[in-house]
């Protein structure tokens, strides 16, 4: 993350790498916090296009993580009342906040077409990855 290129180019490369490298990561994307408007704006992503380019804080899992920035794992989206459907194929989701100096700046959102594929190892890996993303956020 800390070598050449723009932030968005680095994040796009990361999305592409995660999607191609982990079989159960079917959609991988970053949402950026817009504090002034209290919305998340879709940034770089890999996977099918989504209609959710702007998500208000508090709406859906991503919006919920914007309000309460903690990693949120949804093993089965059909059992989650606050889920925003991006595709009929999505069965599970993990959302990991990106925090810079204690401030929420964005998040990594990963959807899977499998039920309950996200393990404790996925969570640890993605939490650590987002910590690294945060270190390079302003570069």
Image (cartoon, rainbow, N blue to C red):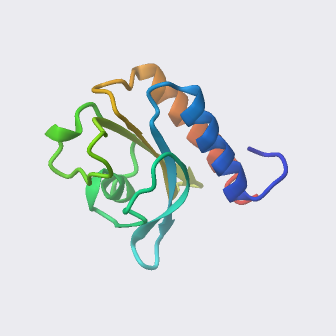
At x 40%, y 51%, the residue is: 69
Residue 33 higher or lower than 9, as above or below? below
Residue 74 seen in this snapshot: yes
Residue 69 in the figure: left or right of residue 42: left
Residue 72 seen in this snapshot: no
Disc tally is 0
Q: Residue 56, how many percent across, how many down?
A: 33, 68
At x 59%, y 43%, the residue is: 15
Q: Residue 58, how many percent across, how many down?
A: 28, 62
Q: Quadrant of the C terminus?
A: bottom right
| Residue sitting nearer the eye, 64 or 81 | 81
Q: Quadrant of the N terminus?
A: top right
Residue 139 higher or lower than 22, as above or below? below
At x 23%, y 40%, the residue is: 77
Which residue is situated farthest in the bottom direction here?
36
| Residue sitting nearer the eye, 87 or 138 | 87
Q: Residue 13, how many percent across, how many down?
A: 68, 44
| Residue sitting nearer the eye, 43 or 104 | 43
Residue 37 higher or lower than 44, as above or below? below
Q: Residue 5, how many percent across, how many down?
A: 81, 55
């Amino acid at each position: 993350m800390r070598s050449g290129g723009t932030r968005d180019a680095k994040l796009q490369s990361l999305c592409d790498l995660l999607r191609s490298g982990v079989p159960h990561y079917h959609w991988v994307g970053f949402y950026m916090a817009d504090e002034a408007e209290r919305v998340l704006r879709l940034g770089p992503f890999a996977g099918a296009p989504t209609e959710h380019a702007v998500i208000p804080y508090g709406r859906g899992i991503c919006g919920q993580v914007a309000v309460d920035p903690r990693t949120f794992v949804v093993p089965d989206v059909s059992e989650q009342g606050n889920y925003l459907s991006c595709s009929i194929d999505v069965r599970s989701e993990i959302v990991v906040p990106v925090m810079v100096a204690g401030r929420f700046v964005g998040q990594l959102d990963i959807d899977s077409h499998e039920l309950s594929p996200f393990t404790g190892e996925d969570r640890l890996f993605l939490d650590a990855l987002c910590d690294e993303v945060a270190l390079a956020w302003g570069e």
